[in-house]
Amino acid sequence: MSLSVSLHDAESAILNAPLAALALGPDTRLGPVGTALDKALGGVIARAIADREFRGARDEVLHLTGGERGARRVLLVGIGTPAQKVMAYRRAGALAARRAKGLGAAALAFHAPGITVGNELEAMVAGLMAGPWEYADLKTPVPEAERRAPLEKLMVVVGDARKAKAAFDAGVALGEGQAIARTLAMMPGNLCTPQHLADTAKAIGKRHDLPVTVLGRKELEQLGCGSFLSVAQGTPQDPKLVVIEYMKGKKTQKPIALVGKGVCFDSGGISIKPAPGMEFMKFDMSGAAGVLGAMETIARLKLKVNVVGLLGATTNMPSGTAINPGDVVKSMIGKSIEITNTDAEGRLILADVLGYAHRYQPSVIIDAATLTGACVIALGHHATGAFGNDERVLNEVIAAGKRGAEQAWPLPLWDDYKEQISSDVADLKNTGGRPAGSVTAALFLREFIPADTPWVHLDIAGTAYSESDLVALPKGPTGIPVGTFVHFVRGRAS
């Protein structure tokens, strides 16, 4: 069932809702809407705050039952005292909507008295849409007698709907793009195949009248994409290089290239992974899912900018035809690569997708990939690793991530590490060993970027999905890096 999201500035929207929610910090005043709701409930909200039953800490939730009139139930959701309110409001919105779904509320009215119209409101709306999301397509429906009412309506209540409309619409567009990315990532690998990613791109293209190009094994062979094809040679599934073109800016404007890794399942190939946890390797296409989600949002926003979204999709499987450690392949741009570990496959795919991106003469290239476990060791699950060959553009991407409630942290891209990927038999090798594994992976990718093209690599291995419940979101895909991609492009739009 579809979820409707609407904007309101009438107090009646929250006073008459089956479930109302207020996002509050330790010192947040209730404001006119919150005060009206408190009055309808006989002052119970103000008493709960005065008695310290609710303190406004991050993720704190107090569930109150309504009275004879007004909202039937109320949630007070804490935002804490965050350094970055954008992330706090997104989290509060997601938590409230997730609780609303669990409570069986048909509609949720959400109000944040202290919010600023702009990025904070956008993030909150996207968070509200993320909270109740789930991938239930393959589950047997719960028996009707045990079924809770589905959450059908999200109502965002603000002081002035006219002033908030642009930010609200942007939040909805972002939420829709992230939902596409999360759905693709959550699908099992036998359903989310390279062909399915290509079909999703075509559906986005058809919906927004955008050209889509899909290249298969035959076309990749003709282009000389030996690096990409080395990963795909162990699987019978046809690999896909997919391109979506959004050219709504000036004809003279060079496009922004967004590039994503799309390994629909990664067994590691001949360098096979350990069995425990291998099921999570269906998420190894999260970079490609992020590109598709971002292109959906960019098209919905009707931005005046030129953007090309590119993704390389295949599976990495062991078989009699799979690539072997020690083999040497040649990339599209002519560089030879010694493959020392077949589980370092994402960079082999991206080498040729980045090479293909050259033909668009992009003004900047940003790629996103669940590339290295080393990045998870370095930064955990709270920050994306960011690398770049242009400090100004790198900082621009990190700032875009903050606006999109997606944290990133810069890591070094020094030539001191380059010796680790030096090969005795080829131009370079695809791994540099365990030390600084995320750095050497980024240095490998840099070999396929023109020297005069600004480029940023986002290693989302620790942030694209979670193997545990995140409180505001269940375990599974997070929607990263859609927000970073979209806010960067918006910052460049005329």
Image: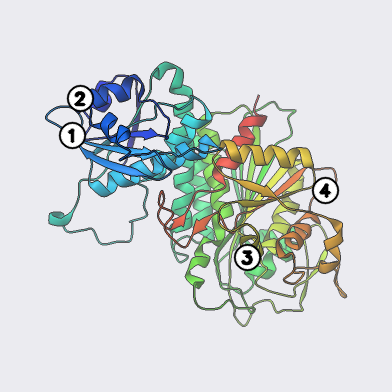
Instruction: Identify which amino acid the numbered label 3 is placed on.
Output: Gly
The residue at which mark 3 appears reads as 373
Closer to the eye: label 2 or 4 = 2
Instruction: Identify which amino acid the numbered label 1 is placed on.
Output: Gly
The residue at which mark 1 appears reads as 66
Closer to the eye: label 3 or 2 = 2
Q: Which mark is residue 450?
A: 4
**Whole-number angstrom distance, CA of label 2 to CA of label 4:** 63 Å
SS at mark 4?
Answer: loop
**Residue found at x 44% / y 42%:** 91
C-beta proximity under 8 Å, tags 1 and 2:
yes
**Residue 395 pos. (x, y %):** 71, 39
* 367 displayed left or right of 445: left
Q: Quadrant of the N terminus?
A: top left
**Residue 357 pos. (x, y %):** 72, 48
User: Which of the two residues, 226 or 295, is positioned nearer the viewer here?
Assistant: 295
Earlier residue among tags 4 and 3 = 3
**Whole-number angstrom distance, CA of label 3 to CA of label 1:** 48 Å
Earlier residue among tags 2 and 4 = 2
Q: Is residue 211 visible?
A: no
C-beta proximity under 8 Å, tags 2 and 4:
no
**Residue found at x 31% / y 46%:** 99
Instruction: Identify which amino acid the numbered label 4 is placed on.
Output: Pro
Res 298 quadrant in image: top right
Instruction: Identify which amino acid the numbered label 2 is placed on.
Output: Ala
Closer to the eye: label 3 or 1 = 1
